[in-house]
Image (cartoon, rainbow, N blue to C red):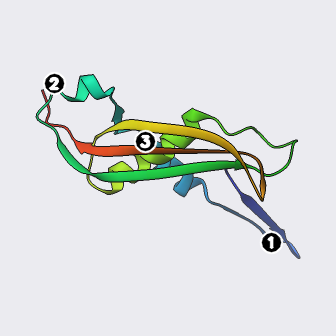
Amino acid sequence: MLVALLSVGCGRFSVQTNASNVLAGQTSALLVKEYAPTEIAQYDASVLGYVEASDCQQRASDTKPNRRSVVNKLKIQTQKMGGNGLVVMACAESVEAMCNRYLACRAEAYLVPER
């Protein structure tokens, strides 16, 4: 989510955003490819570990959690671990105390050699 804060004072105007953080996350997600379990087996890939991510719809008027946004979070975590591939093992939707809908996914992060 992009957040912007505006401050207006006596003849002074400034804008602060988290745009660089949002763009950095989107760039990280682009560097990681999602593979199927059978597909990753064709590579001499190294397992880096498990990653987990989730999304919560707090109010009925909020956007529903979706797999794409949760997988993007997984990709960002994978890239931070030094990986460039991931295999989503499972995703589950549920109702949590603070969420109308809650989607959580778990994946394995990989370092896949270039071909």
Instruction: Please report the residue visible at 64 percent of the width from the left and 48 percent of the height from the top.
Output: 55
Mark 1: which amino acid? Arg
Q: On the image, numbered disc 1 is attached to which residue?
A: 12
Quote the CA–CA distance across marks 2 and 1. Answer: 59 Å
Q: What element carries label 2?
A: loop
Label 2 Cα neighbours within 10 Å, binned few <14 / some 14-19 / many ≥20? few
Quote the CA–CA distance across marks 3 and 2. Answer: 22 Å
Q: Which of 84 and 56 is in front in this view?
A: 56
* Place of residue 83 in the rendered image (x, y in percent of width and height, measured from the top left): 27, 47
Q: Is residue 62 left or right of residue 16?
A: right
Q: On the image, numbered disc 3 is attached to which residue?
A: 29
Instruction: Please report the residue visible at 34 percent of the width from the left and 33 percent of the height from the top.
Output: 33
- The quarter in which the C terminus is drawn is top left
Q: On the image, numbered disc 2 is attached to which residue?
A: 42
Mark 2: which amino acid? Gln
* Place of residue 59 in the rendered image (x, y in percent of width and height, measured from the top left): 85, 49
Q: Does label 2 or label 1 sit earlier along the sequence?
A: 1
